[in-house]
Image: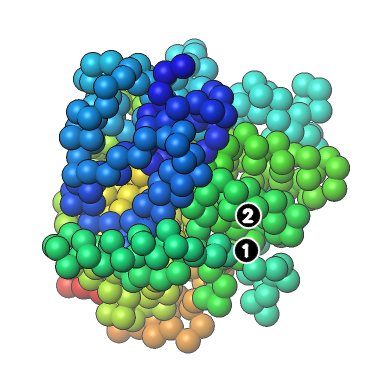
Amino acid sequence: MSRRWLFADQLGPHFLDERKQPVLLIESKAVFRRRVYHRQKAHLILSALRHRAAELGDQAIFLRGETYGQALRTVREPLEVCHPTSRRALEFVRERDGVTVLPARGHVTSLEDFADWADGRRGALRMEAFYRFAREHHGVLMDGREPAGGRWSFDTENREPPPKDGRLGVPAPPMPKEDDIDAEVRADLDRWAREGIRFTGRDGPRRFPATAGEATARLRHFLKHRLAAFGRYEDAMLSTDPWLAHSLLSSSFNLGLLDPVEAVRGAERTYRRQGAPLAAVEGFVRQVMGWRDYIWHTYWYFGKGWGDSNELGARRSLPDWWRDLDADAVGARCLADVLTGVRDRAWVHHIPRLMVLGNYALQRGWRPAELVEWFHTRFVDGYEWVMTGNVVGMSQYADLGRMTTKPYVAGGAYINRMSDYCGGCRYDPRQRLGEDACPFTAGYWAFLARNRSRIPANARMARTMKQLSRLSDLDAVVAQEKRRGSDPP
């Protein structure tokens, strides 16, 4: 049996064909020289890789070196590897003699099935249409030929603002316990930093699974104790509770520790056997086999050039306070809290990413490619394939609608409705002009004014554009936002 080379995001048992299959694992120091990673992300990657090597014992050859190329020169046998998760890695393995590339794993729908579906469609490839295809193709939440509950989506039930008292009434997610491997990783990262390898963010206790066992335990806890509350509040934001009822499994999926099929089937069983609310279950399934699979497939299907899209002409570089996660420099309560979450945990859930971080960057006209890199390196679950679609196609609307029908841009009213941030903030979400003007509200109108000739006309934007044309103070708002520039709000 050929030796299976596992990258550090292919660490679960579903990346092997047999329990005793020989394995190759490589730890490359150059990976951490090439990019400025969040300290906690670097810790999680190394901890997961080293834990997997310890689990496999003599079954694995574990090589530590400066580069993958140097390590591979010491291997004298044929290798096979599952389709890597980035174009650069795929090109690298295809150039190696004696390495066989196998089909991709770690997603519900195969690349081939997505391509067959996409090739047969006309027009834009919308996630909603793919999600229906995937549900039918894999028989998930289906009652015969009809979707469970008679509807494909329960999104309208899954948009509630946070409870007034700020409490969801669910137990906290289980946190992993660090061990000797984590201590070794922390010591090595301290030494690397002294040697000149740069990290950002704060070190902290490891909060995310580094083994398949830890990931499975977190999944079981989520399905039993937290899934029922997940759907209703999945779009809510609370300054007092960063976790809410989210599963905290994205890094486990993206490290390859947890098979998404297991999570999807487990959620469906919780609905059918334990009576979990269908809206919550459908919302979770939509995120895992709908959106996550869709982002993976569009990364490969749209090709390399798509990631360079910048159709709104966003030219500003990311400011240092943003790059360095300097949350203390920010006065706007929502942005300060979310940036603090990135700095201190290397994680916030999808709505702060989209409607606070992404929204703010879109309004300021920051370069999409720089944002992809920032999200990639600052989040424990960030990878190029994950962030290309989420940033270029979704939050920055840089491809003018290949993925979404309108920009995900909003003023302070949205944040006020969906969070507890605006109470006590120095800015007023109702104001767009003056010292108290909310940077999101003012930035919203300035963004629309700057891009009204670029954004394609469609029914979802028509009312907003009419309102824009009626603003008597628009010129003053635009001038105000130019003066503010990229300074921390």
Q: Is residue 205 left or right of residue 217?
A: left
Nearer to the camera, 45 or 264: 45
> Would residue 353 be visible to someone looking at this image?
yes
Image coords of residue 419 (percent x, y) = 55, 71
Residue at 41% across, 54% down = 47
Q: Is residue 13 left or right of residue 119?
A: right
Q: Is residue 314 left or right of residue 19?
A: left
**Along the polypeptide, which appears first: circle 2 or circle 1?**
1
Mark number displayed over residue 174: 1
Q: Cβ–Cβ below 8 Å for labels 2 and 1?
A: yes
Above or below, 327 relative to 86: below
Q: Quadrant of residue 175?
A: bottom right
Secondary element at tag 2: helix
> Would residue 304 be visible to someone looking at this image?
no
Amino acid type at image mark 1: Pro
Q: Which residue is mark 2?
A: 218
Image coords of residue 13 (percent x, y) = 55, 35
Above or below, 388 relative to 467: above
- Work out which residue is located at the far left of the displayed protein and give it: 196
Q: Quadrant of residue 25?
A: top left
